[in-house]
Image (tube, helix red, strand yellow):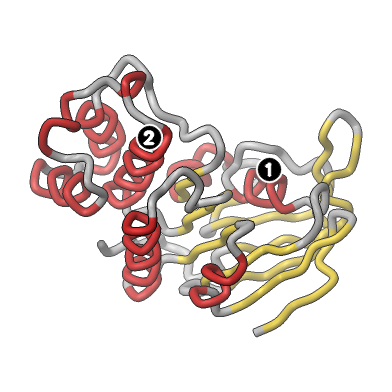
């Protein structure tokens, strides 16, 4: 599960005075942050603190209106397409194609990085969506099976930065443990993880660093 190499050896995330607007409201309000490669960073804070917006900014999905941002060596203002190619995100909406089968979803993303059949099968097997589930259209899956499929895609893509919003939602106990194992394996191979979760006890055991957000800025940083 080795992440793809990137030319830049800069930090995984660099944000300086970053402002991101949601309907003219500054969901990020001048946030400063550096995340080094290989970290597992847990985001905490009350609702509206900016956790989800921070993840979406790092995924290249929400633009910054002011400030400097670089993710996996790519500029958030001028190279957002490159950012999206280098990161993977699992959020409340899993970004799956409902009309495609599980395998077809993995084939679509795997084709972008030249993943072979063995890699597709391994990813589906790790997340328990192989066998008969592989040929089921995503629209016919349960919420937990959809989440498993989304993680299988991250495994196939070997993204350098994993951005996870409530990663354990909809999963049974066994699948939660599998996700935790995958995150440890990914960071051991050089990937970086940023995640937000209400399952604080579980995530605290994974995290190497805890960031507390409030009002769209970082107000606490524990290593």
Q: Residues within 10 Å of mark 2 (few under 14, many from 20)?
A: many
Q: Residue at x 68, y 43 (%)?
A: 77
- Per the image, the residue denoted by label 1 is 77
Q: In the rendered view, does 141 fall on the left or right side of 165?
A: left
Q: Residue at x 58, y 42 (%)?
A: 79
Looking at the image, which is closer to me, 215 or 180?
A: 180
Q: Measured from the top left, where is residue 97 in percent x and y?
A: 38, 22
Q: Is residue 10 visible in this depiction of the protein? A: no
Looking at the image, which is closer to me, 28 or 68?
A: 28
Q: Secondary structure at mark 1?
A: loop
Quadrant of res 180: bottom left
Q: Measured from the top left, where is residue 58 in percent x and y?
A: 62, 50
Q: Secondary structure at mark 2?
A: helix
Who comes first in sequence, dot 1 or dot 2? Answer: 1
Q: Where is 129 relative to 183, above or below?
A: above
Q: Outermost residue, front direction?
A: 173
Indicate the quadrant containing the C terminus: top left, top right, bottom left or bottom right.
bottom right
The number of numbered badges drawn on the structure is 2
Looking at the image, which is closer to me, 77 or 134?
A: 134
Looking at the image, which is closer to me, 189 or 199?
A: 199
**Contact check, label 1 and label 2, Cβ < 8 Å:** no
Q: Where is 96 relative to 144, above or below?
A: above
> What's the distance in space between the residues labelled 1 and 2, CA to CA?
31 Å
Q: Nearer the viewer, mark 1 or mark 2?
A: 2
Q: Is residue 116 visible in this depiction of the protein? A: yes
Q: Measured from the top left, where is residue 76 in percent x and y?
A: 65, 47
Q: Residue at x 58, y 61 (%)?
A: 199
- Per the image, the residue denoted by label 2 is 146
Q: In the rendered view, does 198 fall on the left or right side of 126?
A: right
Q: Outermost residue, bottom direction?
A: 223
């Amino acid at each position: 599960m080795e992440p793809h190499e990137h030319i830049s050896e800069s930090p995984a995330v660099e944000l300086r005075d970053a402002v991101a607007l949601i309907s003219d409201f500054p969901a990020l309000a001048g946030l400063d942050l550096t995340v080094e490669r290989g970290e597992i960073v847990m985001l905490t804070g009350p609702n509206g603190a900016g956790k989800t917006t921070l993840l979406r900014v790092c995924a290249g999905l929400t633009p910054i209106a002011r400030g400097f941002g670089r993710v996996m060596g790519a500029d958030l203002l001028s190279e957002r397409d490159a950012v999206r190619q280098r990161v993977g995100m699992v959020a409340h909406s899993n970004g799956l194609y409902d009309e495609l089968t599980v395998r077809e979803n993995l084939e679509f993303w795997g084709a972008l990085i030249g993943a072979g059949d063995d890699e597709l099968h391994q990813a589906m097997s790790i997340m328990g969506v192989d066998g008969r589930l592989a040929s089921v259209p995503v629209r016919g899956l349960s919420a937990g099976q959809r989440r498993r499929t989304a993680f299988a895609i991250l495994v196939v893509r070997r993204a350098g930065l994993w951005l996870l919003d409530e990663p354990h939602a909809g999963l049974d106990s066994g699948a939660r443990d599998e996700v935790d194992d995958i995150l440890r394996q990914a960071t051991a191979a050089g990937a970086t993880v940023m995640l937000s979760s209400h399952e604080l006890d579980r995530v605290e055991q994974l995290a190497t660093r805890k960031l507390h957000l409030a009002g769209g800025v970082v107000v606490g940083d524990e290593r």
